[in-house]
Image (spheres, grey):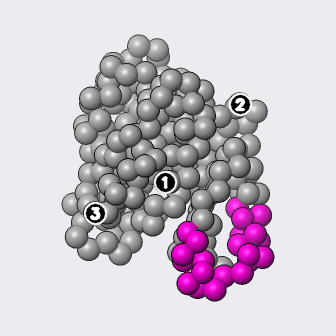
Amino acid sequence: MRFTDRSHAGRVLAGMLDHLGDEPTVILGLPRGGVPVGYEIARHLAAPLEVLLVRKLGVPTQPELAMGAIGEGGVRVLDVQRIERLGIRPAAVERVERRERRELARQAGRFRGEAPPAGLGGKTAVIVDDGIATGATARAACLITRRLGAGRVVLTAPVAPREASAIFAEVADELVVAHTPRRFAAIGMFYGDFRPTPDATVVEMLERSRERAPGQGPGG
């Protein structure tokens, strides 16, 4: 399966989440790429769209390779085996974490302003990303969502490795993935358009979601 872009991927996933239509649900897009996907799901389910702030901790010499992730509320998830295997010193991990915490704070101000994180008490939280690779970021997102009081955590993405079900069994109540390819190298290979999502697009989609009229029906 190949998606035209993130919006297309979101529409595909939206149709797989109809069973959530009767539950009090909040859609949590992981910025930035998860927000356009989440926007389509939120529109289909007539649910609010918020951002859940999580940052990958990239290996110093290979930033695209995750050695962990951090998120709001002090959540920190490390791939200890990878860190040890690559011989990454604690000081190097701390330097990367400090940089990513600064970006986390910047995103909070840009996307949320003075507003607090989404109120999730007792609700179904649907965490949305544009794809799952190592799973470090998504795992941190699930932990954050639990801390924010979600009654149920659903993790969804257009594409993920086949072993994703086992990886997230302990942190998510449900995993919904449109495509689990036999060969998985990079998320972008499953998209026609995988250009980075600008901050302005994230802000615009959040504002449009908040302005939607209450009571709008699914798919409206």
Q: At x 72% / y 81%, what residue is drawn? A: 89
Contact check, label 1 and label 2, Cβ < 8 Å: no
How far apart are the two marked residues, 3 and 2, measured between alpha carbons?
A: 37 Å
Q: Which mark is residue 126?
A: none
Give the residue displayed 46% in from the left and 14% down from the top. Answer: 214
| Residue 89 counted in the magenta span | yes
Identify which residue is drawn at 41% across, 13% down: 215
Specify which label sits upstream in the sequence, 3 or 2: 2
Camera-near label (3 vs 2) is 3
- Residue 197 % position (x, y): 52, 55
**Amino acid type of disc 1?**
Ala
- Residue type, mark 3 in image: Arg
Q: Which residues are magenta?
A: 79-100
Say which label, 1 or 2, has the lower sequence index: 2
10 Å crowding of disc 3: few (<14), some (14-19), many (20+): some
> Do the numbered discs 3 and 1 sit on residues whose CB atoms are within 8 Å?
no
- 151 or 39, nearer to the observer: 151
**Numbered label attached to residue 138:** 1
Amino acid type of the residue tagged 2 in the rendering: Ala
Few, some or many residues within 10 Å of mark 2 (<14, 14–19, 20+): few
The answer to whether residue 208 is above or below residue 30 is above
Label 1 crowding class (10 Å Cα cut-off): few <14, some 14-19, many 20+?
Answer: many
Which residue matches tag 2?
115
Residue 137 image position (x, y, % from top left): 53, 57
Q: CA distance from mark 3 to mark 1?
A: 15 Å
In the picture, the quarter occupied by the N terminus is bottom left
Q: Which residue is mark 3?
A: 162
Q: Secondary structure beneath disc 1?
A: helix
Q: Secondary structure at mark 2?
A: loop
Q: Is residue 4 left or right of residue 25?
A: left
